[in-house]
Amino acid sequence: MESEIEKINYTSVLGRPIKPIEFSTDELVSIRSEKFLITGAGGSIGSRIVSLLASIPGTEFLATDRDETALHSLSLKLTSQALFDSSNYELLDVRDFSGVNSAIKSFGPTVVIHAAALKHLSALQKQPREAALTNVFGSANVVDASIKYGVRKFINISTDKAANPSSVLGFSKHFAELYVASKRASGHPAFTSCRFGNVFNSRGSVIETFFTQMRIGAPVTLTDSKIQRYFMHVDEAAFLTIKSYLINSGDIHIFNMGEPVNMLDIVLRMQQLLGSKSPILITGLRDGEKLKELLVEDDSICGESLSADIKNLSLNMKDKSGLAPILEAIESRDEAAMIKLLEQVK
């Protein structure tokens, strides 16, 4: 008998199939020739990237995360071994500059996939310092160490909230995008970012929240009946990440996620699938939240890539208003200046 959680899947809720993961023979040869270091490997996206790489025989990788429980679960899932029984898993906090340098120096990756981040909008809206330390300075730590120790290719995982940002989360991720793009423009042409919409039913996602509320019969909290979001499957997110390093066609890569989905429709579909009678409670948009997310900034140039499912963006690095003080604050790890920049959006 199908369980409640099994009823809530990507296809049943969104009504569309998952795009297949397909690498050409040449791409598989390229992947096997690299050494990958992944930050945030215990998270929903990071763990799926590691799983995808581990499924390709001969691929070398080091999965890192500051969450020992999440990293242990990933190790157990892939190898049936505890965390410290394998050299492929290592505890690492991207805020720790010395630790990041040591990990990259000792492992010697050719590709770094940076998935570590704080992602909860409301929490970061209240605590911009946390966004500065992890999403901005933590990202810069990984970028700078990668450059220092000769990493050729770097992929920063970002979010659609970074396009025309309106929240601390969005600005922190946008600043990280800008920092990666600045390095790309100054002699590191294989440093790039990829921008995701909502990853369906990832840990801490709105889908998980809706499911829990319906399961216990609590009101389903929806900020606005007209709110829309882009969705993608975690397998698609992992695919886009690997494809971004392979294609490397611009500052940012964006996966074709179709049209944005109305969240009220999502709630109603989940209620139907679960037989839930939980009332819907409209709470109002949260501070910094948009009614509809964008994938592309107004002043960005969007183009095609070698993959029909991926667009590329070139950020306007020359005319970006206030770009110099942002990059200076990141370079110097000026906490006070960065928090002030982030707090301006509150």
Image (spheres, rainbow, N blue to C red):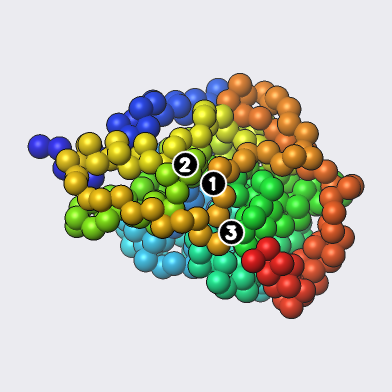
At label 3, the amino acid type is Gly
Residue 169: x and y in percent read 60, 59
Q: Secondary structure at mark 2?
A: loop
Query: Depth check: 292 or 151 in front?
Result: 292
Please tell me how crowded label 2 is: few (under 14), some (14-19), or many (20+) other residues with Cα within 10 Å.
Answer: few
- Spatial separation of the CA atoms under disc 1 and disc 3: 10 Å
At label 2, the amino acid type is Lys
Any part of residue 270 in sight: yes
Please tell me how crowded label 3 is: few (under 14), some (14-19), or many (20+) other residues with Cα within 10 Å.
Answer: some
From the image, tell me which residue sits under label 1: 291
- Spatial separation of the CA atoms under disc 1 and disc 2: 7 Å
- Spatial separation of the CA atoms under disc 2 and disc 3: 16 Å
From the image, tell me which residue sits under label 2: 226
Residue at the far left in the pictured view: 1
Q: How many marks?
A: 3
Q: Which mark is residue 288?
A: 3
Query: Depth check: 242 or 252 in front?
Result: 252
**Which of pointers 2 and 3 lies earlier in the amino acid sequence?**
2
Horizontally, residue 77 falls left or right of residue 68, namely left
**Which of pointers 1 and 2 lies earlier in the amino acid sequence?**
2
Residue 147: x and y in percent read 76, 56
Any part of residue 75 in sight: no
- Answer above or below: position of 272 versus 218: above
Q: Residue at x 73, y 46 (%)?
A: 191
Q: Are marks 1 and 2 in contact (CB under 8 Å)?
A: yes
Please tell me how crowded label 1 is: few (under 14), some (14-19), or many (20+) other residues with Cα within 10 Å.
Answer: some
Q: Secondary structure at mark 1?
A: loop
Q: Secondary structure at mark 3?
A: loop
